[in-house]
Every structure is written in structure tokens, then in C-alpha cells.
Image (spheres, helix red, strand yellow):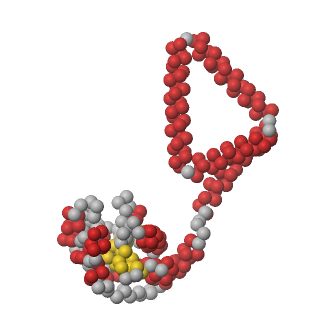
Amino acid sequence: MLIALVLMYFLLASFACWLLLFPSGRATLVQAMVNLGWRMHRRAQRFSHGGGAQWQRAHQRAGHGMARGWQLLRRHRWLSLAGGLLIAVPPLLAWLWSDRIALRGYADRQYAINEQVSELLKGEQLAPPPALPPLVFTTAEVTQLRPLLGGASRNWQLLDPDFAQRLLLVFKIMKEMHGYDMVLLEGYRSPERQNQLAAAGPNVTNAKAFQSYHQYGLAADCAFMHEGKLIISEKNAWAMRGYRLYGVTAESVGLQWGGRWTMMDFGHAELRQRGVLAR
């Protein structure tokens, strides 16, 4: 009997943890309770239409059940108290410590990134990487994914100096810490080119001229070089791992990452400044 009670309390505690830590679990439970309440309401209506005596008998049975349950709890009050604590304490501890849970290895990387950010703030000036041959950006694989990439500007001098230094720091961290060679696909974008891309459809961009930080040199699209080839495809597992590391690194130096948008743009990063797009 004792083993059965302990097992029951363990299952209840696990269920409570599941509800506390997973929003989808809470939503499922709420929906189930709504459905149950609706069925009980309909059954109650049938009872009331069927006659008062039937409804009274059902009400009496429910009352007797509640009374027996209360007597059982009073008879085993210490066991009930221990069970209640066993159910309540684990979810409470999980909730209190949930903001301190981190994946193994990420804490050390965060400190390393912060140290390099401090170097940037002290005035470290990073130099842009050497320009790649134009043919790198016009291969069949690249053109299939980005057919308009050939006309993009990759001139670092046209970028805002603060944004350029932050992006170069991201490139440096990605190379030294994660082994990814990053490439600037497009930086500054003229109003005419922005309208051209917007006319290509919402799968390219929804922003028209002067509605994008590209026009102000405050945004860039980036990808990776691997074994002499430009890798853009998000279906490539190696590239997707790089994009997520790139997003974390970009955010750590104060940039906004396009991978968190509704229309996800994993290679995009921008430095938002108040009032820029309202000019």
C-alpha cells in the first residue's frame, strides 16, 4: 500500500512539473477541462429535463463522495501533508532555479565573447577581410538561392563605422571560437536596389526604399565559406549550426539578428538606431 501511494505521489509530482515547465501542457489541460465542463453541463441539463428526483440522487451521490474523500484525508492527514509537499516542492524548486539552467559549455563561451566585446569598446580597430573574387557569388548553387546577389555591394567602407566594427568582431569570434569563415554577402543597399528586391516578392524582402537599415549602412547579410565554396543554404546542417552561433554572437555585441523575425533571415544582422528609419 505504501509503495502504491509513493508511486502515485511521484506521478502527481511529475505531472505538476510538466504543467509548470511546459506551456503546451498547460494549454492541453485547459482545453481538456473546458471539454469536460461542457460535457458535464450537457449531462446536467439532461438530468434536469429528466426529472428532479434523478438530479437529486446524483447530487446526493456527489455529496457522499466528497464527504468520504474528506474523511479519508483527515484519517491520513500526515501522509496527505507529506504527499502534498512532495507534489509542490519539486515544481517550486524547478521554477525558482529555471532561470539558472544553462547548457553545458555555453557559460565559458559567453565570458569569452564579453571579453572581446570589451576590447571593441576600448577602441580596437578591426580590418575588413580581403575581397573575394566576384565568381564566388555567381556560382550555380548561389544563383539558385540568391539570383540577385550579383548586383550586391560588399564595400565595407560604405557601412556605418560602428556597425562595421561590431560585425568584424562577430567575424573574428566566429573564426577563432567556432571555426567558421564568414563572408559579407551584401552591406549597403541603394534605394533603387531595395525597390528592385521588394518588387521580386515578399520571399525576398517586404521593405521598400528607406524602410531598411541597409540604406543607412547599418545592416548586412552574411554567409560562410567552406572548402572554397560559398555556403548559403539553410538546408545544410553545418551552415544552420553556424547561423545559430552567428545569431548568438551578433546579439552579444549589440546587433539584431534576423533569425528571430517572423520571416526568418538567418544571415541578416543590423544595428538599430532610434529615428533612423523615420527620416
Q: Is residue 163 visible?
A: no
Q: Locate residue 114 relative to residue 220 in the image: left or right.
A: right
Query: Residue 160 versus residue 186: which sits nearer the camera?
Result: 186
Q: Residue at x 28, y 69 (%)?
A: 144
Instruction: Examine the rendered structure and indicate whether residue 163 appears above or below residue 61.
Output: below
Q: Residue at x 30, y 81 (%)?
A: 136
Quarter of the view holding residue 193: bottom left
Query: Residue 172 versus residue 243: which sits nearer the camera?
Result: 243
Residue 249: image location, x then y, percent: 46, 73
Query: Residue 220 versus residue 215: which sits nearer the camera?
Result: 220
Residue 9: image location, x then y, percent: 71, 43
Residue 187: image location, x then y, percent: 30, 76
Instruction: Examine the rendered structure and indicate whether residue 90 appears above or below residue 211.
Output: above
Q: Is residue 193 visible?
A: yes
Residue 276: image location, x then y, percent: 30, 69
Where the N terminus falls, by quadrant?
top right
Where the C terminus falls, by quadrant?
bottom left
Q: Residue at x 51, y 14 (%)?
A: 49
Query: Residue 74 versus residue 142: which sits nearer the camera?
Result: 142
Instruction: Examine the rendered structure and indicate whether residue 22 appears above or below residue 124.
Output: above
Q: Locate residue 70 relative to residue 184 in the image: left or right.
A: right
Q: Residue at x 80, y 32 (%)?
A: 75
Quarter of the view holding residue 152: bottom left
**How many discs appear?**
0
